[in-house]
C-alpha cells in the first residue's frame, strides 16, 4: 500500500475542516429555516386569534347597534356598518383558515372543516338576526313598540348572544389550544435545535481536533528528528543519522539529509588529510626557511659589523688625525721659535693640554661605544637620589667651556627623587646634553636645569637658547656619528656620539629621552625615568 504523502495529509486535514465547517453551516441554515417556519406558524396563530377577537368585537358592536333601535330610533346606517365589519372579519378569518398549510394526516383536515363550519354557522345566525332586525324595525316604524320589544327579546337578545357567544367561544378556545400547542412545539423544537447545534459543534470540533492531532503527529516527530540532526551537525557531529523510515516528503528529506551529512563527512576527512599533508610541508619549508633566514641574518649582521667597523676606524682616523696634527703643529712651532719665552711655552703647552683633553674625551666616547656593542658595560641598579646626582652634575659643569656670561639656572624638587639605577651612568646621561647646551648657548644667556617628579616619573629638563634643531636634526640627533649643521653656530667638535650614548644609558634605565626644538629658538632635552616604587627589581644588570 503506497504511503500517504504530506500533501495528501494536508489536503485530507483541510477537507475534514471544510466538511466540518460545511456541516456546521448546513446545521445553522437548517436551524434558521426551522426557526423561520416556527415564526410563521406563531404569526399565523396570532393572526387567527386576532381575527376571532375582531369577530367577537364586531359581533358585540352589531348586537349593541340593534339594541339601540329602541333608544335612538330606526336609522339603519350604523347597524349596516357594524354588520359589514362583522362580515369582513368573518371573511378575513376564513381566508386565514384556508391559507394556513395543513400538516400531513386526516386530523388537521377535520379541524379545518370544523372551523369553516363554525364560520358558516356564525354567518347563518347573522343572516337570521338581520331578518329579525328588519322585522323589529318595521314594527317600530308602525308604532308597535311592545310587539317589537317582544320580538327582540324572543329572537335577538338571548338567541344572538347565546348562539354567537357559543360559536365564537368555541373558535376562540380552538385557536387558543392551537397557540398553546404551537408554543409548546416551538419550545420542544428549540430544545432539539439547541441540542443539535451543540452536537454539531462538538462533532465538528472533535473532527478538527482529530485531524489536527493526526497531522501534528505525522509532521512534528520527523521535524524534531530533523532539527536534532541539524543541531548535531552544527556541533560537528557528522556521524549523526536522522532515523525517519517513511516514504513521504519528510522521509525523502531525511534520506537526503543523511546523504548530505555523509558527503560533508567525507569532504571533511579529505580536507583534514590534505591539511595534515600541507602542515607537514609547511613545517618542513618553515624549518628550511628559518635555517636559511638565520644564515642570511648572520651574514647580514657580519656585513653590518664589518661596515660599522670600517666606518668606526675611518671616523677614529679622521677625528684623531685633527687633534694630533694640531698637537704636532703647536709642538713644532714652540721648538722652532728662537728665544721662546716661558710665557709663550706655557701658552703652547696649554693649547697642547686642551687638545689632549679633547682627544681624551673622544677616546672615552669611542671606548664606551665599543664596550656597549660588546656588552661589557655593567649597570649597577640600586636606589639613587637624583637630587645628589644633580648636585654632582652642577659641580662637574663648572669646568665646562662656555661663552662669556653663560650661566646655569638650576631648579630641583622639594624632596628626594628616588629612582632605581646606576648613579654614575645617570650623571653621564645628564652631563652629555648639559655639556651640549652650555657649549652652544649664546653669550650672556642662561641654561636651565630642572628636576621634577610627575605622576610616578622623574623628569630632568635641560633647556638652552642656542641655535636649536631642525625637525630632521631632532629626529636624527640620537643616531651615532650624526653631527648637526656647523653653519648655525655649532662648533663641529666631537664624533656625534654623545646623545646616542645618553639614549643608550636612559634606555637601560627604562626611561625615555627626547628633544623639543625649533631652529633659532633653542632646544629642550627631556629625560623621563620611572620612580623607584614602580621598579621593584634592584639587582645589578649587565648591559647588552
Image (spheres, grey):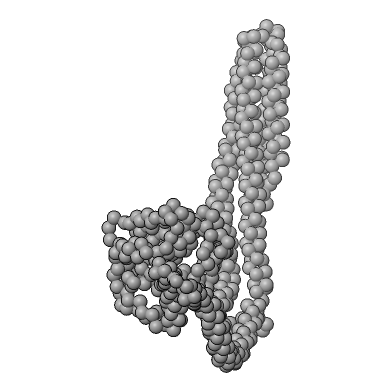
- Quadrant of the rendered structure where residue 246 is? bottom right
Q: Is residue 22 visible?
A: yes
Give the answer, above or below, for where 458 lies relative to 190: below
Name the residue at 58% across, 61% down: 487
Name the residue at 62% across, 32% down: 50
Quadrant placement of the N terminus: bottom right
Give the answer, above or below, for where 80 lies relative to 356: above
Q: Where does residue 100 sit, x and y in percent of width and height?
A: 69, 42
Task: Compare residues 342 and 120 and report the one nearer the observer.
Answer: 342
Q: Residue furthest left?
A: 415
Task: Compare residues 504 and 349 and report the one nearer the observer.
Answer: 349
Left or right of 289 on screen, residue 8: right
Name the residue at 56% across, 43% down: 183
Q: Where does residue 346 sit, x and y in percent of width and height?
A: 40, 69
Quadrant placement of the C terminus: bottom left
Q: Is residue 327 visible?
A: no
Amino acid at each position: 500500500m503506497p504511503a500517504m504523502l504530506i500533501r495528501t495529509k494536508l489536503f485530507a486535514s483541510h477537507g475534514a475542516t471544510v466538511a466540518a465547517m460545511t456541516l456546521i453551516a448546513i446545521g445553522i441554515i437548517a436551524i434558521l429555516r426551522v426557526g423561520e417556519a416556527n415564526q410563521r406558524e406563531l404569526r399565523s396563530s396570532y393572526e387567527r386569534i386576532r381575527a376571532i377577537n375582531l369577530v367577537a368585537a364586531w359581533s358585540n358592536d352589531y348586537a349593541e347597534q340593534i339594541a339601540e333601535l329602541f333608544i335612538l330610533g330606526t336609522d339603519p346606517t350604523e347597524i349596516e356598518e357594524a354588520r359589514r365589519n362583522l362580515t369582513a372579519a368573518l371573511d378575513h378569518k376564513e381566508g386565514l383558515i384556508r391559507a394556513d398549510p395543513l400538516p400531513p394526516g386526516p386530523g388537521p383536515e377535520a379541524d379545518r372543516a370544523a372551523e369553516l363550519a363554525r364560520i358558516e354557522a356564525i354567518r347563518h345566525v347573522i343572516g337570521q338576526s338581520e331578518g329579525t332586525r328588519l322585522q323589529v324595525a318595521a314594527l317600530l316604524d308602525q308604532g308597535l313598540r311592545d310587539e317589537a320589544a317582544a320580538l327582540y327579546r324572543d329572537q335577538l337578545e338571548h338567541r344572538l348572544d347565546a348562539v354567537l357567544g357559543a360559536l365564537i367561544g368555541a373558535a376562540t378556545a380552538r385557536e387558543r389550544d392551537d397557540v398553546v400547542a404551537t408554543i409548546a412545539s416551538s419550545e420542544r423544537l428549540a430544545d432539539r435545535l439547541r441540542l443539535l447545534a451543540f452536537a454539531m459543534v462538538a462533532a465538528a470540533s472533535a473532527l478538527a481536533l482529530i485531524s489536527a492531532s493526526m497531522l501534528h503527529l505525522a509532521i512534528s516527530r520527523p521535524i524534531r528528528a530533523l532539527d536534532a540532526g541539524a543541531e548535531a551537525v552544527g556541533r560537528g557531529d557528522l556521524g549523526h543519522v536522522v532515523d525517519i523510515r517513511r516514504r513521504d516528503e519528510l522521509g525523502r528529506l531525511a534520506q537526503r539529509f543523511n546523504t548530505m551529512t555523509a558527503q560533508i563527512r567525507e569532504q571533511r576527512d579529505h580536507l583534514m588529510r590534505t591539511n595534515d599533508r600541507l602542515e607537514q610541508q609547511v613545517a618542513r619549508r618553515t624549518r628550511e626557511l628559518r635555517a636559511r633566514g638565520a644564515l642570511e641574518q648572520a651574514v647580514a649582521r657580519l656585513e653590518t659589523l664589518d661596515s660599522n667597523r670600517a666606518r668606526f676606524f675611518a671616523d677614529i682616523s679622521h677625528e684623531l688625525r685633527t687633534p694630533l696634527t694640531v698637537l704636532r703643529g703647536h709642538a713644532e712651532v714652540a721648538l722652532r721659535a728662537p728665544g721662546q719665552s716661558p710665557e709663550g711655552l706655557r701658552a703652547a703647552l696649554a693649547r697642547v693640554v686642551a687638545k689632549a683633553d679633547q682627544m681624551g674625551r673622544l677616546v672615552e666616547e669611542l671606548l664606551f661605544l665599543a664596550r656597549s656593542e660588546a656588552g661589557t658595560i655593567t649597570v649597577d641598579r640600586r636606589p639613587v637620589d637624583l637630587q645628589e646626582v644633580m648636585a654632582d652634575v652642577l659641580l662637574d659643569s663648572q669646568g665646562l667651556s662656555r661663552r662669556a656670561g653663560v650661566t646655569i639656572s638650576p631648579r630641583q624638587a622639594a624632596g628626594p627623587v628616588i629612582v632605581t639605577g646606576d648613579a654614575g651612568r645617570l650623571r653621564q646621561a645628564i652631563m652629555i646634553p648639559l655639556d651640549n647646551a652650555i657649549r652652544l648657548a649664546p653669550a650672556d644667556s642662561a641654561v636651565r636645569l630642572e628636576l621634577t617628579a610627575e605622576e610616578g616619573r622623574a623628569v630632568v629638563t635641560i633647556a638652552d637658547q642656542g641655535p636649536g634643531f631642525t625637525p630632521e636634526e631632532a629626529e636624527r640627533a640620537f643616531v651615532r656619528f650624526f653631527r648637526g649643521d656647523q653653519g648655525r653656530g655649532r662648533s663641529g667638535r666631537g664624533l656625534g656620539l654623545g646623545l646616542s650614548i645618553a639614549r643608550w644609558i636612559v634606555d637601560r634605565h627604562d626611561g625615555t629621552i627626547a628633544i623639543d626644538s625649533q631652529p633659532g629658538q633653542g632646544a629642550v632635552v627631556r629625560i623621563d625615568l620611572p620612580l623607584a616604587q614602580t621598579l621593584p627589581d634592584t639587582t645589578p644588570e649587565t648591559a647588552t
